[in-house]
Amino acid sequence: MHITEVIKKPLLTEKTYIGHSNNSYTFIVDKRSNKTQIKKTFEEIFNVKVKSVRTLNYDGKDKRMGKYAGKTASYKKAIIVLKDGEKLDILNEE
């Protein structure tokens, strides 16, 4: 898997903004990626040192639109904690 396919987009919610003060950032990642691939890719793209990576898999929810039934897409979320002294300037609002 190429490094551009591993990390898809940041997950920006109120809860993830609270984590920014503790050097933890949340991203949507490819479902096939593992923790070591995520860590290696993140360090290579953003030039920071990663302390730990936690991953969570989410299944799609059942949704209805009138008589039509369907599912939302499933996804994988990664919570990436940076080492002390490291900072990700892209998502900070300072």
Image (cartoon, helix red, strand yellow):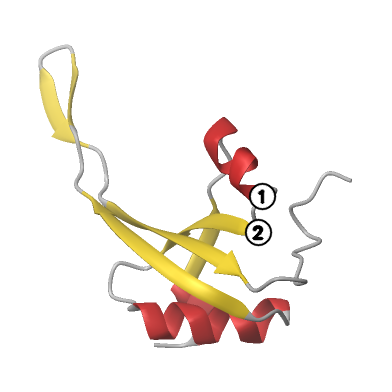
**Where does the image place residue 6, in percent across and percent down from the top left?**
45, 75
Mark 2: few, some, or many residues within 10 Å (few <14, many ≥20)?
some
- Helix or strand or loop: what does disc 2 sit on? loop
Report which residue position mark 2 lands on.
23
What residue appears at the point 47 percent right and 88 percent down from the top-left corner? 2
Circles 2 and 1, Cβ within 8 Å, touching? The answer is yes
Classify residue 82 by image quadrant: bottom right
Give the CA separation, mark 2 to mark 1.
5 Å
- Viewer-proximal residue among 31 and 84: 84
In what quadrant of the picture does the N terminus appear? Answer: bottom left
- Viewer-proximal residue among 44 and 62: 44
Report which residue position mark 1 lands on.
20
What amino acid is at disc 2?
Answer: Asn
- Helix or strand or loop: what does disc 1 sit on? helix
Residue 3 shown left or right of residue 17 in the figure:
left
Classify residue 55 by image quadrant: bottom left
What residue appears at the point 52 percent right and 87 percent down from the top-left corner? 40
Considering every residue shown, the one lying at the far front of the view is 84
What residue appears at the point 77 percent right and 71 percent down from the top-left corner? 85
Residue 51 shown left or right of residue 72 in the figure:
right
What amino acid is at disc 1?
Answer: His
